[in-house]
Image (cartoon, rainbow, N blue to C red):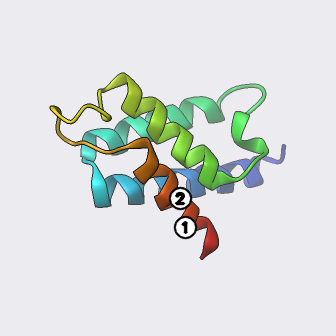
Amino acid sequence: MDKALLLEKTQKLVALTSKFCDEFLDEDYKQLCEKLILKMARKRQVPFESGKLEIWAASVIHTIGTINFLFDRSFEPYSTPRAIADYYYWVSKT
């Protein structure tokens, strides 16, 4: 993959996750998502080379959220997998 295209996709993916984190989560989630995305971008075969970036953004947040109890109501911040999916569904439609 062309480095310029990879950089562009990486920046778009970070922007997509950052926007969700700014609206619904917190700065810690934002940083963790960015860290995961940048780590994936350094792989020999970058996972988000193919597929929709909205799906990748939802997957990154879901993965970080699963590890950090995002789906447990007794923790803050709290969200549901459905809320994440719905958010990125509507983002993909605009």
Q: Residue furthest bottom?
A: 94
Say which residue appears at 64% left-offset and 36% top-offset: 41
Mark 1 crowd level (few <14, some 14–19, many ≥20, 10 Å Cα): few
Looking at the picture, how far across and down is residue 36, in whole percent?
A: 50, 32
Task: Count the labels in the image.
Answer: 2
Q: In which quarter of the image is residue 43?
A: top right
Q: Quadrant of residue 76?
A: top left
Left of 36 or right of it: where is 22?
Answer: left
Say which residue appears at 51% left-offset and 51% top-offset: 85
Left of 81 or right of it: where is 79?
Answer: left
Q: In which quarter of the image is the N terminus?
A: top right
Left of 82 or right of it: where is 7?
Answer: right
What amino acid is found at the position of numbered circle 1 in the picture?
A: Val
Q: Mark 1 points at which residue?
A: 91
Q: Quadrant of the C terminus?
A: bottom right
Q: Mark 2 points at which residue?
A: 88
Q: Is residue 66 above or below residue 60?
A: above
Say which residue appears at 32% left-offset and 34% top-offset: 71
Q: Contact (CB < 8 A) between labels 1 and 2?
A: yes
Left of 20 or right of it: where is 57?
Answer: right
> Disc 2 on helix, strand or loop?
helix
Looking at the picture, how far across and down is residue 62, in whole percent?
A: 46, 37
Looking at the picture, tell me which residue is in the foreground, 85 or 59.
85
Looking at the picture, how far across and down is residue 17, in whole percent?
A: 46, 51
Name the mark on residue 35: none
Q: Is residue 82 above or below residue 19?
A: above
